[in-house]
Image: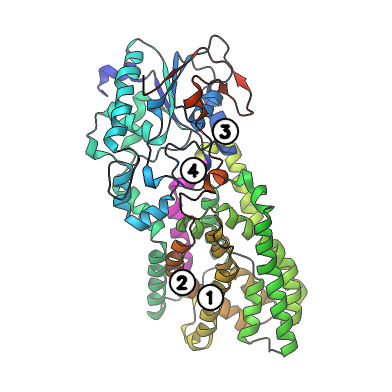
Amino acid sequence: MAAPAEQELLSRLFMVRHGESTCNSVHRIAGSRDAPLTILGREQAEKVAGNHRGRHFDRVYVSPLSRAFETAGIILGDRGEDGPETVVDERLMERDFGSYTLECKSILQRRHGIAEYERAMNGDSPTMRGGETFEQFRARVHAFYEQELLPALRRGEVVCVVSHKYVVELICRFILDRPVDESYDLRLPNSQMLQGDRIHGYVKNENKTMNMVYDWIVVNHPVVFCAGLAAGLLGNLAGLRVDASPYLLLLLLVAASVITMCRIELENARRFVTDKGILRSVAVRYLVLPLAFAALLHWWGAGSTSTAVFAAVFLATPSSVVAMTVSRCLGGMIMPTFAQVLLSSIAATFSFTGVLALTLHDHVVPAIAISAATSTGIVVAAYLLVRQLRQRSPIRTAKFGERNGYVAVLLLTGFVVLVALHLDLSGFPTYAPAATAIAVGLRLIASLLKRRRHVQTLDDYVAMTYPNVFVVVIIGALTGNAPLERVAVWTLLPMFVLAFFDSWYAKSLVVAPDDARWPAVLGLRPRTPATTGAPATTDTTGTTGTTGTTSYVSTQS
């Protein structure tokens, strides 16, 4: 099909995967469920519309699921009676993934292995129960390809197909005449328009083996972290001491967080920042608990270099931006973690005021001001940067975040290596026990304070277990408390080693995909287009417009 003689025919074919859906934003598999577009998804569709404004289409084939139909409506706009014929075809629906539906990609990869996950999504696997077999899925898409798409192209029509990831990728394989057993994930981003005669170049850039390696790094991040830790400690023992700049270490953390934030629904941040459950969790964990503990220590007369005082400072320490990357790797919703990182940074201004005044006494004012400004400023700056990127280039930014999750893990691993190379190992007997106790204690507290059986439980736990150690280092330096500063640095080691425990414990915190709350959380809709016949084209505001004539093709007809 891709022979030179067919290039003119293929040049009249354009295919688009729908814009980002609510399931895409939390890395869950929508399949045949009707997940709506997010704000970014509509912005992505508008970007495509702007890039292809004035392009003529004779016919548009579209899936009946709203995320695809709305994308098509935005791309086409209101072209009046001169608009193309719009054909809603059920054969363009995404595959029914059975028991994989509404599961998180990283959770499935960790449970079944990456190779088996790829086999299930691009073929058949005993790990996927129910839904469509790959042959059933392939048969209906191939029927559309042979009976509708090719005849339209051969009539000389300019055709646009707006559908779903696995449908578009399957059509690409038909065009390239690839064997069925060669199927693998082509990493097709939301709302990227593919022109038929350029499909070969796009597919050529995808490497199945490397894509699986990248996924392995994300899923097995505890192994990667600990490998980096081992390499750093061995280098340290061999005499390779490196005094990395604090600014470089901070840059690594921020860069990893920016990559993660590129792929989360920042446009909906207000919903999570004002969530009563998150606000309550932050108030208890970052205000009530540290202040109460610090008051107890003050009454007790604990010394400023005692482990108990160090623990009080860590209790007041806001959540680290690292938590967002860990949430993504473990299968969390990520946005609740972002909200806790931001709110805990704001709360730290008040909690540090009380905790430092009650425990450390010396140079409290500058320590509070600089540490609070650092923690809050970093989060806000990263948010504003990524929000701007998502507005200016919604397709490329989301694509970058989706494809580079492994880079975020490697950046954090680089951070671990540099910290391990910097450590004074002679301080192990003095500081390692206290650091380990703090890292374990934070996990115990998180397990007690997290919301029970909530869709955000995993995010609660992760946000509370990864403190912003840089803030503690700053406090130790400004107050002249060298032991606190050293304990803070040593705490990084058990914090990343315990990622193994977090990965295991996360299995008990994730809400099952068949939980009755997911439809409301993800805004899943009943399949109205499939049940009411030919729908009207909808734009981003919900108004309707006409794009030529609209017809409906059912798989039953």
Residue 267 is situated, as x and y percent measured from the top left of the image, at 62, 43
Amino acid, disc 2: Leu
Q: Is mark 4 on a helix, strand or loop?
A: helix
Q: Nearer the viewer, residue 80 or 429?
A: 80
Which residue is identified by label 2?
498
Of badges 1 and 4, nearer the viewer stands 4
Q: Name the residue under label 3.
A: 42
Of callouts 2 and 3, the N-terminal one: 3
Residue at x-position 58% and y-position 68%: 467
Whether tag 1 and tag 2 are in contact, CB under 8 A, the answer is yes
Which mark identifies residue 439?
Answer: 1
Judge whether residue 85 is colored magenta. no
The spot of residue 370 in percent (x, y) is 71, 67
**In the rendering, which numbered label is found on residue 24?**
4
Mark 2, Cα crowd under 10 Å, few <14 / some 14-19 / many 20+, is some
Q: Earlier in the sequence, mark 3 or mark 4?
A: 4
Label 2: state its secondary structure. loop
